[in-house]
Amino acid sequence: MSKIAIISDPHANLEALIRVLDDIEDHSVDEIICTGDLIGYGPQPQECCDLAREREITVLQGNHEQGLINIYHLQGFNQPAKDALRKTRAMISDETYTWLVSHPKSLVRYGCRFVHGLPPDSVTEYLWKHEHSLEQVFPTYPEQVCFVGHTHDLMRFTYGKGVCSERLPLPEGELQLDPTLRHLVNVGAVGQPRDGNNAAKYVLFDTETLKLTVRFIQYDIQKTVDRILACGLHRGFADRLW
């Protein structure tokens, strides 16, 4: 039996990441997997990367990591996000840059798939863009459960006998996944939630019982806001934390 924690989109928000990792420590997990976007938007990319390495978190490549690679990938971002990534590159060491861009785009472990955007391995595609055609997505990978991030919005879908559900809610607390179905779970965001609740979000998953637990974690938002403004990042990245 394995119990894992899945986090996504810390976005250089060290205050949120610390509080989430503190909470995870109370649940005796076997591994922490981050589905990408450790950096971007936020004021402490180097510190978040250092912490992820210290805690031996398994990290996947997100679109913001990909945006660091070259100008081709950077073109997919709006101007404030481009500016933030350029500033991020200046704020991290060369060694950290190499570590960030070397992460895999997808991972299969514990019989589950992990990817930033859309399975089987897209770091840029948003789940909500495909939610009415997921009958075409589920057959592209074999795992029963797939965890994604990228949208910063908790949601889930089920699939069985060629039929996909509509978007299903993913509230705080415990949820038993149906073992007769396949599941696609968006774990929300640690660093920049966009689901109407400003708490940092992550999930715990028991790979044997298929029990999913959604955790909402409070942190000192004002500290992150102050740091965003102090380092010259776009004010919108601070405002939307509230």
Image (spheres, helix red, strand yellow):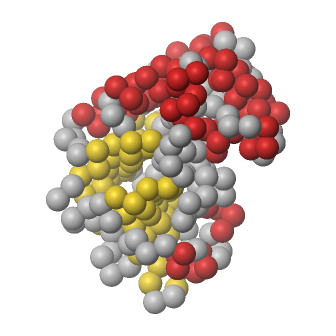
Task: Locate the C terminus and report the quarter of the image it occupies.
Answer: top right
Q: Residue at x 37, y 33 (%)?
A: 20
Left or right: 7 in relation to 189: left
Task: Give the image location of residue 3, x and y in percent.
Answer: 24, 52
Residue toward you, 236 or 106: 106
Q: Quadrant of residue 77?
A: top right
Task: Give the image location of residue 125, x and y in percent.
Answer: 66, 58
Q: Quadrant of residue 2?
A: bottom left
Q: Does residue 206 appear anywhere in the picture?
A: yes
Q: Residue at x 56, y 18 (%)?
A: 93
Q: Does residue 242 appear anywhere in the picture?
A: no
Task: Locate the N terminus and report the quarter of the image it occupies.
Answer: bottom left
Q: Quadrant of residue 145?
A: bottom left
Residue toward you, 155 or 124: 124
Task: Give the image location of residue 71, x and y in percent.
Answer: 79, 38
Q: Residue at x 44, y 56 (%)?
A: 107
The total number of labels drawn is 0
Task: Give the image location of residue 115, x and y in percent.
Answer: 51, 55
Q: As drawn, which residue projects farthest toward the bottom?
A: 161
Q: Residue at x 47, y 79 (%)?
A: 159
Left or right: 10 in relation to 127: left
